[in-house]
Image (cartoon, helix red, strand yellow):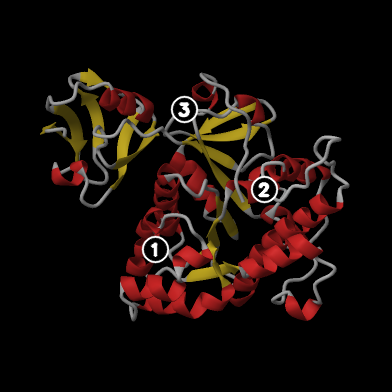
Amino acid sequence: MAALLGSPGPGLASACVPAGAWVEPTAAGPCTVPADDLFDRLARRPVLLLGERHDSAAHHQWQLATLAALLARSPDLSLGLEMVPRRLQPVLDRWVAGTLEERAFLEALDWPAIWGYDVDLYLPILRFARDRRVPLLALNVERQLVRRVRAEGFAAVPAAEREGVGRPAPASRAYQVQLHRLWQHHPFVPSSGQGLPGLEDPSFRRFVDSQQLWDRAMAEAIAEQRRRHPGAPVVALIGNGHLAGGHGVPHQLRALGLGEAAWLLPWDDALDCAVLQPGLATAVFGVAPAPPPGLRLGVYLETHGGRVEIHQVAPGSLAERSGLRVGDGITAIDGQPVSSARQAIDAVASHPQGRPLTLTIRRAGQPLQLQLALP
C-alpha cells in the first residue's frame, strides 16, 4: 500500500528530522535520540516493523542498515517480507539455506508477478539475509484474494477460501480516513456527479476490507513466528501505509496479543513536520535525498553526535572503488568540515563536476585523505 505520511512542506522537514538522525515523536515535540540507545531499547521488543516506500532506494538502504544494527544485538531474529505470499515460504527457506542460486531463486519467486517493484531495490537485503543465515518469513496472501475481497467484501468470501486469515480487528476512524485519502487515487473508485463517495460508500468499505485483510495476514504470520520461536524477535519490511499511526499491522498485532511491537519509518525531507505527532511511529529516521546522477558516492551515512559515519558501501560503487569502508568517519569534504549526513550530501551534490573530490576521513582513530575522481 502506498504511504501518505503527510503533505509536502518544503523547508520544514530538516527542522524536525535532520538527515541521518533518529527522532522520537513525543508530546513535548520531536526528540533526537542516539542510534545506539534506540537500538539497545528496540532489541528488547518482540516485533520490529520497518516501513518503506516501495520504489525508494534510500528507504531500502536505510532498512538494510537498520537490520544490520538489530542483528548485531539480536542474532536470532527473523525477517518478514510483505512482498512474498505464504505459499512461497519453501523458496525463502532454500535461499537462506544456500541451495538456490540467485537467478533460480528469483525465478521460483516470480518476483514481477508477486510484487512488481524493481527487485534490484531488494536484492541487497535478500543477499544479506542469505549471507548471515537470517530466516526469511513470507507474510502475505495471494493478490487474487486481495482483489476478491476488494470486489466482494471480506464477509462474502467463505472462511475456507481466505488462506487461513481470521477476521481483522475493526478499523479505527483514523485509519478509515487515512485509507480514504489513498482510495481516491485508485482507478476503481466509482465516479459520481456528487463528488467523491464518503466513508460509508460500499465500494470504499470493501477497499477497507481488502487493506485489513493484508494487515491481518501479515500480523498473523508474525504472531505465528513468535509462537514457534518465542524468544526470537521478528523484524518485518512493510509499506509505510500499513504502519503509520499504528492503525494497520500494529493494530492487528495488538489484537493478537503483541502490544509491544515497535514500528520505525523513514522520513523524507519533503514531509510536513506537523504530522510528526506521538503515535505516528516509535521513531523516524531522516533519509537524505539522493544527490544528482553522476555525484553519487554509493554510501549510506548516519550522524552520531556530530560525527558522520559510513554504515554501508554499495558494491561496485565509486566509494568501494575508492577504498571507503564501513565504519569510516567523514570529517571534511574539499577541506570543509562536516558534522551531519545532510552536510555531507549537500557538499557532494554541489561539488563541481570533473574535478577530484577530496574526502578527509577517520579510520581506526587515524586521519586519512582520499581523492575521488568523479564521473
The amino acid beneath tag 3 is Pro
Element under disc 1 = helix
Q: Residues within 10 Å of mark 1 (few under 14, many from 20)?
A: many
Q: Position of residue 37 (x, y in %)?
A: 48, 42
320 or 183: nearer the viewer = 183
The amino acid beneath tag 1 is Leu
Relative placement, left or right, of 18 versus 25 is: left
Identify the mark nearer the N-term, 3 or 2. Answer: 3
The residue identified by callout 1 is: 126
Real-space Cα separation, disc 2 to disc 1, in angstroms: 32 Å
Residue in view at x 46 percent, y 27 percent: 18
Label drawn at residue 18: 3
Relative placement, left or right, of 56 versus 175 is: left
Residue contact at pointers 3 and 2, CB within 8 angstroms:
no
Q: Position of residue 182 (x, y in %)?
A: 68, 43
Residue lying at the far front of the rendered structure: 193
The residue identified by callout 2 is: 187
Q: Is residue 56 above or below residue 249?
A: above
42 or 145: nearer the viewer = 145
Residue in view at x 69 percent, y 63 percent: 147
15 or 303: nearer the viewer = 15
Real-space Cα separation, disc 3 to disc 2, in angstroms: 36 Å
Work out which quarter of the rendered image holds the C terminus and state it. top left
Q: Quadrant of residue 236?
A: bottom right
Q: Quadrant of residue 181?
A: top right
Element under disc 3 = loop
Q: Position of residue 372 (x, y in %)?
A: 13, 33
Relative placement, left or right, of 38 versus 147 is: left
Residue 334 visible from this viewpoint: yes
Real-space Cα separation, disc 1 to disc 3, in angstroms: 28 Å
